[in-house]
Amino acid sequence: MTLAEAIESGDYLQILLAQRREIAADLPDEKGPAKAALHRQLSLLSKEIEALQRGGAEDAEGGANVEDGEFDAAAI
């Protein structure tokens, strides 16, 4: 999916993935500060993508996968 197609879809994760693909494709042609900036942006995008994907996995499992303790009404 191209960046334009991802934007049209309105899916934020797909937009981030398309941006990451474009940056990865542009990196070999860059030098100096532009290359450093693209590396930084690539790192930030990758972290955000990972967080979104991890959140989606938790949603599919029904939450944060934490076991509930016993309810104690007297504690309220």
Image (spheres, rainbow, N blue to C red):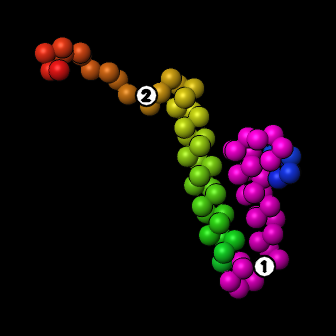
Image vertical order of residue 76 relative to residue 32, above or below: above
Q: What element carries label 2?
A: loop
Going 66% across and 77% down the picture, which residue do you hit?
Answer: 36
Q: What residue type is labelled 2?
A: Asn
Residue at 32% x, 21% y: name it: 68
| Vertical arrangement, residue 12 with respect to residue 29, above or below | above
In the shown orientation, is residue 14 left or right of residue 73?
right
Q: Quadrant of the C terminus?
A: top left
**Of residues 74 and 42, which is closer to you in this image?**
74
Horizontal and vertical percent position of residue 44: 60, 61
Residue linked to disc 2 = 65
SS majority, magenta: helix
> Callout 1: 10 Å neighbours few (<14), some, many (20+)?
few
Name the quadrant containing residue 54: top right
Disc 2 crowd rating (10 Å Cα; few below 14, some 14-19, many 20+) is: few
Q: Are marks 1 and 2 in contact (CB under 8 Å)?
A: no
Q: What stretch is highlighted in magenta?
A: 7-35
Local SS, label 1: loop
Question: Residue at position x 69%, y 71% from top?
Answer: 38
Q: Up-down: is 1 above or below 40?
A: above
| Residue where numbered disc 1 is placed | 30
Residue 19 is labelled as none
* Distance Cα–Cα, label 1 vs label 2: 43 Å
Where is residue 46 drawn, in percent x and y?
A: 63, 56
Outermost residue on the bottom side: it is 32
For marks 1 and 2 on the same chain, the one whose residue lies earlier in the sequence? 1
